[in-house]
Each structure stands twice: as C-alpha cells, then as structure tokens.
Image (cartoon, coloured by chain):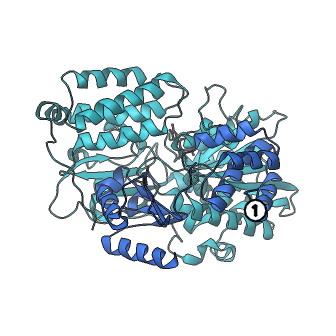
Chain colours: A blue, B cyan
Amino acid sequence: MILNKISIAEIKERMVKYPRRKSVILPALTVAYRQVGHLSDQIYREISDIIEVPYIEVAEAASFYTMFPKEPVGKYLIQVCHNISCALLGADSLVGYLEEKLGIKKGETTPDNLFTLISVECLGSCASAPMMQINDKYYENLTREKVDRILEELRRQG
Amino acid sequence: MEKRILFKYIDDPNQIHIDTYIAHGGYKAWEKTLKTMQPAQVIDEVKKSGLRGRGGAGFPAGMKWNFVPKDSPKPRYLICNADESEPGTCKDRVLMEQDPHGVVEGMAIAAYAIGSHLAFCYVRGEFVKPAALMEQAVKEAYDKKMLGKNIFGTGYDLNMVVHTGGGAYICGEETALLNSLEGERGMSRIRPPFPAVEGLYACPTVVNNVETLAAVPHIINNGGEWYASMGTEKSKGTKIFSLSGHVKKPGNYEVEMGTPLSYLISELGGGPLDGHKIKAIIPGGSSTPFLLPSQIDAPLDYESIAAAGSMLGSGAVIVMDERTCMVWVIERLIHFYRHESCGKCTPCREGTGWLEQLISRIERGEGKPGDLEKIDSICDNILGRTICPLGDAAVMPIQSALKLFRDEFQYHIDHKKCLVKSEFEFK
Ligand SMILES: Cc1cc2nc3c(=O)[nH]c(=O)nc-3n(C[C@H](O)[C@H](O)[C@H](O)COP(=O)(O)O)c2cc1C
Ligand code: FES
C-alpha cells in the first residue's frame, strides 16, 4: 500500500459527504497527491478499492488534471506562473533567475531531488505578480532578494 | 472612491473567525431569511437588487434561481463556483481568504431560495489556503448550528461541502464543473438542458460565482432597493476589480458599477509605471477584447464596456504599457487556451492548436505571408461553433489584437522580429 492510514481515513471521511461515490475521485486524488507528491497507477488502484469505483474511472479522471504530477518530482515543486499579468512583470526573467540559481532548466529536477522547476498557467494571484507556488504555498510580489531568501530557507529545511 | 460592501472587513485578520464575523453583523441575513422569508421572497429581493452574475456572463442572479422548477421531485443543488482561473482574475480568492463566512452565508441563503439541502463550493485545486479557510468556516458554522439539521429551529436542513478541483480552467465553465464534481473529466456539456433543470447528478442545480453569492447577505440585510440604488441603470451595486499588469498599485478594488476605468487605473492603481504610456487594456479578464488608451474614460459597467467593444467579464483589468509586444501577448494567451481546451469539440481542440502554431511561428520570426489571413479564418471557424464558450474566449482577444494592432503582426512577418521587444525584468 502506498496510501497511509491518515490518507485512507481522510478519503473515507469524504465519502459520507457526497451523494455519489464517483464524486470522491478528485478529492481522493488530492489526498494522495498531498501525501505522495505525485500520482501513479498503483495509487489509482488503491483509490479504486477504497471508494469502490472502477480503476479505469479513477485513472481517466486523473489523466485529465495536469495539476497532479504523474511522475516523481523533487521535494519542492516550484511552479512559476507564466501567464499574462505575471509575464508583464517579468515572469520569464523569474524563471531564468531560478534556472540559474538552481542550476537546472525548466522542467528538470535538481540532482539532490530537492527542487523541480516548472512554469504553469495563471494561479489567481495576478495582482501580486510575479509569483510562484511551491508545494501548497503561494509566494507573491517576488523580487530577486525574496527568491534568494526563499530558496535558502528551503535548502536549510532540506 | 472605493465602495466597500463585500470588502468592508477585508483588512480585519479576525474576520475569518465566526465570532468576529457575527460581531460584525454576520449570519443575521441567514437568520432573517430562515425565520421570516419564503424562498420566493428571497428570489424577489435578489431580483429587485438587480444583482448580476460576477463570474463573467453577467446573468441576473434572481432570474437564474427562478428557473429551478418548483415542482421537481428531485433534490436541488447549489454550487459556488470558486474555480477562478481566468487570467487576470484574483478576487474570489481574496473573498475566501479574508471573509470566508460571507461566502458561506451567501451560499446558504441561495440554497434556501432554490430549495436545496446540499451546497458545494468548488475551489480550484491550487487554492489550498482558500479551500482550507472555507473548510474551517463551514466547520465553525456547523458548530454554531448555522448549518446542519434544523437550523435556527426552523426545521430547515442544509449541508455544505468544500470540494477541491484539479487546476483546470475549463472546470470554471459551469457544465464542465458539474462533470468534474461528478468525478468525470472536466468536459463541457451541450445546453440545453440548462443546469437549473438538469445539472449535478441530472438534478436542478444553480451555479453562481463566489462574488455573486457574497453579495447576497448584504442584499437580504439592506433590501434589494438599497443595492439597486448603487451602480448604473442596468448594472447595479458594486463590483470587485482585479487590477494587474503595468500599474503602480495593482490590487483588488471594490467600486460602484459605472466608475470610470481611468479612475480605477489612475487613482486607485496609481497610474502607469513611471515614464511609460499605456498601450492597451484588457477590461474583463484575458478572454475579453482590448481597449485602447483613448477609451480609458469608459465607465466600468456591463453596457458601457460592451459599447466600447469589449466585455466586463470577471472584472479583471490588465494594463499593458508601450513596451508590450502584442504578438507576444497573444502568444501567451493562445498557449493558455490551447492547454486548457478540454478537447471535446473539434473547432476548439484543433483550432486552438493551429492558432498556437501560427502565432508562435510569427512570434519566433518565422511567420509567412498569408498567416494573418489563416488566423482570421480559423478564428471565424471557432467563434460561435463550440460546445462551450472557451472557444470564443480563445478567439476574442486574437481577433481584437488583429484588428487593433494588425501592423504589429505584419511587421513581425515582414521583418522577422518584434516592433517592440517585451523584455520585462522582475526586480
Ligand atoms: C472557459 C470558462 C471558464 C469559466 N470560469 C469561471 C470561473 O472560474 N468562475 C466563475 O464563477 N465562472 C466561470 N465561468 C462562468 C460560468 O460558466 C458561469 O457562468 C458562472 O459560474 C455563473 O455564475 P454567475 O452567474 O454568478 O456569474 C467560466 C466560463 C467559461 C466559458
Ligand atoms: S497571471 Fe500570474 S497569477 Fe494570474
């Protein structure tokens, strides 16, 4: 089993709230993603068993939502918004700066598996551009100085 | 001037707690609704207010609620659309993060008005914090018996679920949202049937935007006439505008409908960045046609912005100054729409892909004579021919840019480079 007791309990707790089991697919994928950091076939099978929905329906739904990585990523998934409001305030140069600081290209993971860098569509933080999301957290109104501090802090936490 | 109604307590960090919310007059409207009003009266009051949907289409809220069949034996559902993914738009997130009980209370009143006993708030997957705050607000409301069984001893039951999505723009489109909430891929549905008749689990369903619902408690407390006394003849009340791009003070500003765009940009937003002139303005989110600086005095209401050739949409105002290359802007946007197309209907799925290829090659300096005409033709073949409006959303800014800034596109093709190069450095 990949999913731990807490995740399974959380998924089961969700099940009583919905009139139909299938509606729990997306919340269950979210719970799994929070625990593991990415989704996989094995996870779809486990969810399928827990919520009693055919495996294929879980896999099909998962395939649609690009927010969930389907391959392992670094401990910290850095997602820089590259959409218009952020781009107007230098999102591309932010990506460039992160590439330089991390020594990787967009789409890659650092050799120590700590950071994965990608760019994504609008994250609903357009008036605090440029911004990025690292795992669950938003970092807004970014400057070089702020980015330096954030990376330093995450490196220290390891 | 800002007119803070929904934003009245937005700067109070304690507003997220139910005790503070109640101390500020919260849940009074919910109590009044349940204890003294029939569902039809609630709908009448909202109709009187003139409140229109803040999710983009501007459909009158009271009228939508009235479409729910009164005699259907099926359960009804109320859904709060918190998918907020239209580039430029970032107001619903603020409401959920700073005043989540306002959203819960609005949802509760709307649910009662349509006879629903189960309401969902569909929050985009990346909004972890807003979803957690909504979840906490719902829990507090249950603890205080504002939700659950026999609320205020009136015999009315209402359950509320905060549901998180998977980060897909299309899931903000109401029929795709319904599919997503049912556990399907988030693909749009052909209408009719409309959700009010056959929505979630094929039952009558009303989908409203966060901001629309957050206005409802104020309307119940102060009356529809009070709300209708603000704004313009056809666009009533206040609206939150998300101001972003090349301005000194970007942010979310609540103003009366009909406030001039120039006031929002210059007074509230501090004007364009130093030493730069405005080149173009998107008034209602990335799907809406551009306005020119000459139109900056347009009043921000549905009718005036339509008369200016665009749409008020979600109220996301994006300002671009003269350093901005319009081909570059359009490439950004079409990349987004191509990525977010659900793939169900051919014109949108294929058309957005072709548009991206053509526009990218022009931006790269590889455009060919005839490319602009090809783009025109693909746009014509998408517009109005798709299952949901995502296709139109993709096409409208492109058509607008080709109309207003065609020279710039032509220059790219002829000279293999930008007329102005967008190279924005972050600080
Ligand atoms: C592609 C697309 C994306 C949309 N995204 C959102 C959204 O994120 N939030 C929203 O409230 N409405 C969105 N809408 C509009 C909804 O379909 C629907 O009209 C709205 O939620 C109704 O609520 P309202 O009447 O209160 O505005 C979107 C529409 C389209 C076509
Ligand atoms: S454009 Fe970057 S958060 Fe919206």
Host chain of mark 1: A
- Identified at 31% across, 38% down, the residue is B308
Nearest to the observer: residue A45 or residue B21: A45
Q: Position of residue B161 (x, y in %)?
A: 73, 55
Viewed as shown, does residue A97 lie left or right of A134?
A: left
* Residue B395 percent coordinates (x, y): 38, 31
Does residue B60 appear in this view? no
In which quarter of the view is residue B206 placed? top right
- Amino acid type, residue under disc 1 in the picture: Asn
Q: Report the front residue among B26 and B390.
A: B390
Q: Is residue B284 visible?
A: yes
Q: Looking at the picture, does residue B268 appear above or below residue B212?
A: below
Residue situated in front as seen by the camera: B265 or B248? B248
Residue reaching furthest to the front: A111
Q: Quick check: B80 above or below A147? A: above
Give the number of marks: 1
In this figure, which residue is indicated by the disc labeled 1? A4
Quadrant of the image containing the N terminus of chain A: bottom right
Ligand 1 shows up in which quadrant of the image? top right
Is residue B187 left or right of B288 when viewed as pictured?
right
Q: Residue at x 63, y 25 (%)?
A: B192
For the residue labelled by badge 1, is the local secondary structure a helix, a strand or a loop? loop
Residue B73 located left or right of residue B78: right
- Label 1 CB less than 8 angstroms from ligand 2: no
Question: Crowding near pointer 1: few (<14 within 10 Å), some, many (20+)?
Answer: few
x, y (%) of residue B248?
28, 65
